[in-house]
Amino acid sequence: MSINVNDISKLKDLDKFRSAPKLSKEQSKLLLYELTNIINNSDWLTIGVMAPSLIKGIKAIRRIEKKFEYNKMKCCTTPSSDGPIFLKANQKTGEIHARIEYGLGEGILISCQNYDNSLTSKTIGPFPLDFFD
């Protein structure tokens, strides 16, 4: 089954992608509106970033912090070498952990978390690294 990027109009459409698709301004606007409603109804976020470098991954997280006026998280674990990176950021703990990870796509995955355990969290994305500009 071929995935047509032009058919993306809802967050669930991103579920089909391993790597973030290139989105039009209109698609980004629709998805951001839907995502913002979900984020505003959650208690905190966990963010996964698949990026070609640590610098690009951290920049993606900083854009999210700026967009939603979150406190700046601290990078607690960084790899000792360069390469493709996976970052896991937890807004609740304020920590970012990074590791080298080969074979991943590229993009941002967001999980909206709740203190109420009866509410399930779902991972949404992947969003392009510059989605939150």
Image (spheres, rainbow, N blue to C red):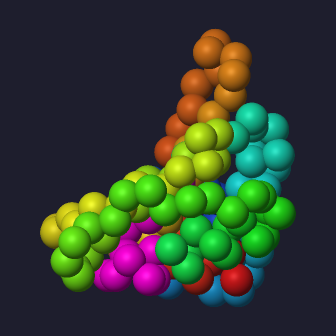
Give the residue at x 77% y 58%: 70
- Marker count (numbered): 0
Examine the rendered structure and indicate whether residue 68 appears above or below residue 52.
above
In the displayed structure image, the side of residue 118 where residue 89 appears, left or right:
left
Q: Can residue 14 be seen in the rendering of this structure?
A: no
Give the residue at x 37% y 58%: 77
- Name the residue nearer the viewer: 16 or 73: 73
Q: Is residue 48 magenta?
A: yes
The percent position of residue 91, horizontal first and vertical second, equals 63, 47
In the displayed structure image, the side of residue 113 where residue 99 appears, left or right:
left
Give the residue at x 76% y 71%: 66
- Name the residue nearer the viewer: 10 or 129: 129
- Name the residue nearer the viewer: 10 or 84: 84
The percent position of residue 122, horizontal first and vertical second, equals 54, 38
Q: Where does the N terminus fall, quadrant-wise?
A: bottom left
**Magenta region: which residues?**
47-57
The percent position of residue 64, horizontal first and vertical second, equals 68, 67
The percent position of residue 16, horizontal first and vertical second, equals 39, 58
Q: Is residue 17 magenta?
A: no
Q: Where does the C terminus fall, quadrant-wise?
A: bottom right
Give the residue at x 53% y 51%: 95
In the displayed structure image, the side of residue 51 where residue 72 appears, left or right:
right
- Name the residue nearer the viewer: 97 or 110: 97
Examine the rendered structure and indicate whether residue 6 appears above or below residue 45.
below
